[in-house]
Image (tube, grey):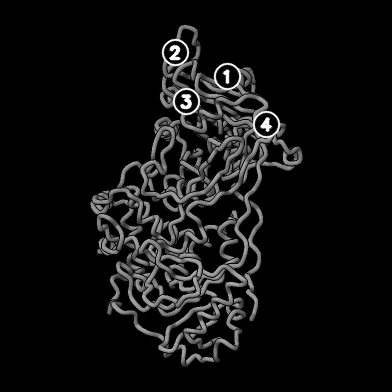
Amino acid sequence: MNSIKMNGSAPEKNIYQPHLMEIIKVIPETADTKTFHIQFVDPSLQETFSFLSGQFAEYSVFGEGEATFCISSSPTRPDHLEFSVKRIGRVTHALHQLNPGDLIGFRGPYGNHFPLDRLKGKNLLFIGGGIGLAPLRSLIHNVLDNRTDYKEITIFYGARSPQDLCFKYDLETWSRNPLVKMITTVDVGDGDWKGNVGLVPVVLEEIGSSSDGAVAITCGPPIMIRYTLKSLEKLGFTPSQIWTTLEMKMKCGLGKCGRCNIGPLYVCKDGPVFSFEEIRSFSSDEF
Amino acid sequence: MFRKIAKENLKKWLIDLKTQAEVLTPAKANALWTYRNFDAQDIPRDFQNSRLPPKGLFLESLRALFEWKSPGGSLQVHPLPALDGPRVIFGLRPCDARALKILESVFARDYPDVFYLRNLSRTLILGQACRVQCEGSFCGEMGIDSQDSTDFDVFFREVPQGYIARAITARGTALLERRDLSEESSAEEWNLARSEPRGSRERPLFDLERVKAAVAESFPDENFWKRVSAKCINCGVCTYLCPTCHCFDLCDLQMPGQGIRFRCWDSCAFADFTKMAVHNPREEKWRRYRQRVSHKFNFFYQNFQAIACVGCGRCVAHCPVNLDLRQVLLETAR
């Protein structure tokens, strides 16, 4: 009897198993949003880990599940990773219960990234809404840490109310930076609010921003992005001058679980960063 | 290599293999055909195909991926191993074997999935030519030859005295080297053993190239998808019975002091499949049905140069509201 011969070898790595990371700091951003600073428990991973602005990861609260968030810190500041979470569902509620010293799971980085090469030498216009500043923030810190590679940097950030502004410490630093033009706006102000009042696209059009040699990078609620796009077009931006990062439901982040597709594209692998020229050519509107 | 094997010898051969490997053959469980550990009885002759596709033997409906424990309060995460140990499955049909190849392209690309790939590499797949065209099936239209396939290690054609076996892979050839239980056969005998499945159609229902183009063209036609999906009740049975559907969820099970994360089948037919915090891009039923058909006949083809449907007919035969994929495909091409 001939013994059974099996085919070659299968891979050994378990692609679903996360690395353990320790929460080293929790920053309350708004009433329902927190930023977490995390570090690999295994110091050798802390040394070797690398990512690019715009990439995302899968974060686990063991026993509650896994959820997808962008990495909101910059690769130019590799001491730790940061991600920001709005409390909405099961995993985000569980994350909000955690404190420094607690352990979470981390898989990543996944997806593509902002095209730094195409931003170099350009005027950069960042337009963020609410928690949508998180992915932009990674890129903003990245370009500020290599400031001489870029021309004018304008950061345009809006939230529903002054209480809903995230990353107030960054907004503060950026507004004091003479090499950054910082504009904040809220939909509804209060007695203490001294910034702009009005929706992001409206204020953007009022203040204006030249599209010459410029690239706009935007992220925020879908409705904001839709109207911001129209405003940018009025200001002369072409679709190839505008970039965004898309949100879709994900489970695996590996292009296998079947949720995050827009037509044939998988946001987890082909995205999440797209130019509006690419988005315009999408065969599907399901995003 | 071709070998001729008498029925009684196939049984002996499989019994022998049981000493080295887990051996699965078609069997009835709860009145439905499935694959079970070979019980050393005769290979059933009335088996057409299993109710559930054999994908579950490779992409299990539930597979534990890793575990965590917190002895003394310190959290530790440990991988759970992929299954090992050689396995032989006898009796798979050409449609289902093709489906395993289609799934392999998903699970091998970019981030190789150890669980699926190990299940494939540890399994010798012995196929059987079909004798009956299954209810609802359109395998021929999908380019599957019910009488021939290279998606197996060994492929068997039934003849009155037993089987003519054709070795396809090197490990299939090695397996057939059992001289005392089989005799030499030839390409002529192999060709003569080819039969026409009972109930097969004289003319194909549709032309695949035409349907493929038509599904892509129909994508923006909202009214079309609303009309064809109107009677769908979102039960998801088509996706669970589908040999190529592979969408999954990742879930946690927490027990006192320990837990596991597992992967389980999920379905694009379910409304919360793509539900996010603030919106759901496929909240409407017609979008989900369009996604399923477009994924199989358009998106998957764009990404993997293969159509993620093998025409097995399970979704047609067992849809509780008789939503017939073949009719939908025909209508796109109309």
Res. A253 visible in picture? yes
Query: From the viewer's perspective, is residue B291 above or below residue A106?
Result: below
Query: From the viewer's perspective, is residue A136 above or below residue A274?
Result: above
Residue topped by disc 2: A189
Foreground: disc 3 or disc 2: 2
User: Relative to residue B326, is residue A55 drawn left or right?
Assistant: right
What SS does tag 3 mark?
A: loop
Looking at numbered disc 1 in the image, what kind of residue is underneath it? Answer: Lys
Foreground: disc 2 or disc 4: 4
Q: Position of residue B156 (x, y in %)?
A: 47, 80
Q: Quadrant of residue B313?
A: bottom left
Q: Nearer the viewer, residue A16 or B16?
A: B16
Q: Residue at x 44, y 53 (%)?
A: A264
Q: Position of residue A71 (x, y in %)?
A: 60, 35
Foreground: disc 1 or disc 4: 4
The reply to whether discs 4 and 3 touch (Cβ–Cβ < 8 Å) is no
Sequence-wise, which precedes: disc 3 or disc 1?
1
User: Which chain letter matches label 4?
Assistant: B
Q: Quadrant of the N terminus of chain B?
A: bottom right
Residue A168: numbered disc: 1
Residue topped by disc 4: B73
Q: CA distance from mark 4 to mark 3?
A: 56 Å
Q: CA distance from mark 1 to mark 4?
A: 35 Å
Q: Nearer the viewer, residue A107 or A65?
A: A65
User: Which chain letter matches label 1?
Assistant: A
Residue A208: numbered disc: 3
What SS does tag 1 mark?
A: helix
Residue B67: numbered disc: none
Q: Are marks 3 and 1 on the same chain?
A: yes
Q: Quadrant of residue B202?
A: bottom left
Looking at numbered disc 2 in the image, what kind of residue is underneath it? Answer: Gly
